[in-house]
Amino acid sequence: MIENYQLRYFLAVVETGSFTKAAKRVFVTQPTLSAGIKKLELDLGSKLFDRTSRRVFLTESGTRFVPHAKSILYQLNLAEADIKSTGRSHLLRLGVLMTIPSSIVANILAAFKREISGLVTELFDGTEQEIQNRLDEGKIDIALTIIRPTLKQEKIPLYKEGYSIALADHHPLTKSDPIHPAEFAGEATIVRSRCEILSETSRFFTDHNVRPRLVYKTNQDERALSMVAAGVGFTTMPDHYTMEGVKRVKMIGYDFQREIGLLKTAYQLSEERNDLLDQFINFTKSHLPEITYES
């Protein structure tokens, strides 16, 4: 009989493309994960992965099994959420793109909790792809993330913003706005490892024959901004990130943009939970202008 943990192991390998990374994601050792995958293949009577020294590939059977695994996990997660919420409180399972300032999310949730008595919020922080995976698996019901036209979920656009340079307010380059990319040659830079346009930013500097000096790499945006304020280096960030001691300036030709909005699960929910999501959507749309700023 196929077990829940086997499906989680399988999808973790699919999403990460690696047994090692998948094991870290589901918090088990690699031998434990490999054993779970092997048992799943025995239960199904078919090989799911082909492995080389560098990569893991889905077999034809594995490819066919992906949507079934997601559907099964979705039903399990949906049932769990319904049981948690029955007779106790409203349950909001929210995914949040980790490159959205925490102040925006905190202010929305604080205000919404004042509106909804007994609200329980389950939060998940992740990358754009991680959030999409959890929507597909039914682990979250709605997400505050990047909106793209190809997504299958119901899309509720909220705001658009660009990306710009974050500098310590005492840095000499703050006197110029916008700044030419050449001005950053040799400058100390802080890399935000979870930035969704990290590769595009690297290519932008390379195309301008500019090589900033890497001094710090972090997956925590608020920490990156704190180090900018401390004068450790500069970084590139979405425009809504602000902090005392940091000045935001534009860079010539660095015209990337993103659209932030809500993605609502495409699966059928109970009437009560669907009503809660609609309340959250309408609340967020009406309150967002009060808790963000126009850059």
Image: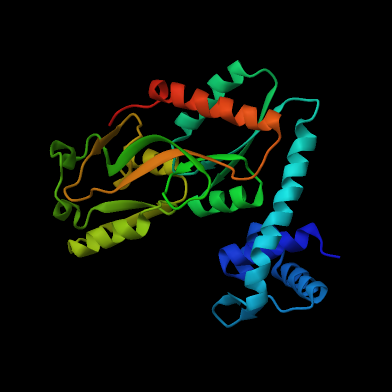
- Furthest toward the right, the residue is 1
113 shown above or below 259: above
Residue 131 point in image, percent of width and height: 55, 48
Q: Is residue 80 visible?
A: yes
Q: Is residue 101 above or below residue 20?
A: above
Position of 16 compared to 252: left or right? Answer: right
Q: Left or right: 123 with respect to 185?
A: right
Determine the image quadrant of residue 264.
top right
Q: Nearer the viewer, residue 253 or 246?
A: 253
Question: Where does the C terminus fall, quadrant-wise?
Answer: top left
| Residue 104 or residue 144, whichever sits in front | 144
Q: Compare residues 200 and 229 and report the one nearer the observer.
A: 200
Q: Is residue 187 above or below residue 41?
A: above
| Residue 162: quarter of image | top left
Kindly identify the residue that appears in the image at 77 percent across and 43 percent down: 79
Residue 20 placement: quadrant: bottom right
In the image, what residue occupies the spot 28% across and 58% down? 213
Residue that lies at the very extreme toward the bottom in this rendered image? 52
Is residue 23 something that shows in the picture? no
| 216 sits to left or right of 279 | left
- Count up the numbered dots: 0
* Residue 78 image position (x, y, % from top left): 72, 43
Q: Residue at x 74, y 25 (%)?
A: 89
Task: Residue 120: give x, y in percent of width and height.
Answer: 68, 28
Q: Which image quadrant: the N terminus?
A: bottom right
Q: Residue at x 82, y 72 (%)?
A: 43
Residue 50 in percent (x, y) is at: 63, 80
Note whether 98 is above or below 85 in the view shown: below
Report the coloring of the rendering: rainbow
